[in-house]
Amino acid sequence: MSSLNSGAGLARLVGCILTAVAAVMAGGTALVLTSLPATPSGDDLIAAVTVAALTVVLFAIGVPLFVIGARRLARQRRVLRTGVPCLATVVAAHNVTSTEDDDPVARITLAVPVAAGGTVTAVVRQVVPARLRRSVAPGAVLPVRVDPADPTFAVIDWTHTPQRHHIAGDVAVDLAGALLF
C-alpha cells in the first residue's frame, strides 16, 4: 500500500465507485428505455427519467472526485520526487482510521522550516507504515519533501525516516547475562 496521502486515494476510490455505479445505471436506463412499449405508461416514464437523472447526478459527482484524487496523488508523487527535502517537527498527530489490519491513516500537523526563516504549518493526511507508528508523535522530527511553490504542501518521505530499534525483553536478558558471565 502506498504511504502517500490517503485523501487523494479516498477521492479517487469514491469517484471510481460512483462512476461505475452510474455506468451500470446508464446501461440499465438504456435497457429500460428500449424495453418500453410503444405507448409507455406514466409510471414507466417516471421510473426511466428518475433512473436517468440519478445516473447523471452520480456521473457529475463521481468523475470530478476521481479527477481531484488523481491530480492530488500526481502532485504528491511529484513533490516526493522533486520537492525540497527538509526536516519537519510533528506538532500533532491523530489517527483517522482505527483498523488493526492495515497501516493507519493519520492526520499529521507539521512545523516546516522555510528559507526565509521561521516555520509554516503543513497538515498531511498519510498512511503511516506499521514499522514507524511510534515515530509519529509530537516533537518527533521527520524527513519531508516540500513543494517549493507552496511550503504548506508537504509529503513525509518515509523511505528516509530513521527506524527505532527495540530489543525485546528476552533478548535483553540474554544479552545482559552473556555480558556479566
Image: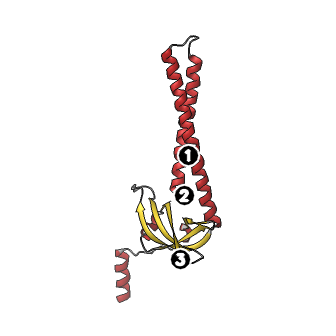
83 vs 50, left or right, is right
Q: Residue furthest bottom?
A: 180
Asked if residue 31 is positioned above or below residue 156 in the image, the reply reads above
The circle on residue 65 is: 1
Q: Nearer the viewer, mark 3 or mark 2?
A: 3
Could you tell which of marks 1 and 2 lies nearer the N-terminus? 2
Asked if residue 148 is positioned above or below residue 33 in the image, the reply reads below
| Position in image of residue 140 (x %, y %) | 45, 74
| Position in image of residue 42 (x %, y %) | 50, 15
Could you tell which of marks 3 and 2 lies nearer the N-terminus? 2
Question: How many residues crowd around disc 1 within 10 Å: few (fewer than 14), some, or many (20 or more)?
Answer: many
* Cα gap from disc 3 to disc 2, whole angstroms: 31 Å
| Position in image of residue 119 (x %, y %) | 52, 74
The residue identified by callout 3 is 118
The residue identified by callout 2 is 2
Labels 3 and 1 touching (C-beta < 8 A): no
Q: The disc labelled 2 sits on which kind of residue?
A: Ser
Asked if residue 58 is positioned above or below residue 97 in the image, the reply reads above
Question: How many residues crowd around disc 3 within 10 Å: few (fewer than 14), some, or many (20 or more)?
Answer: few
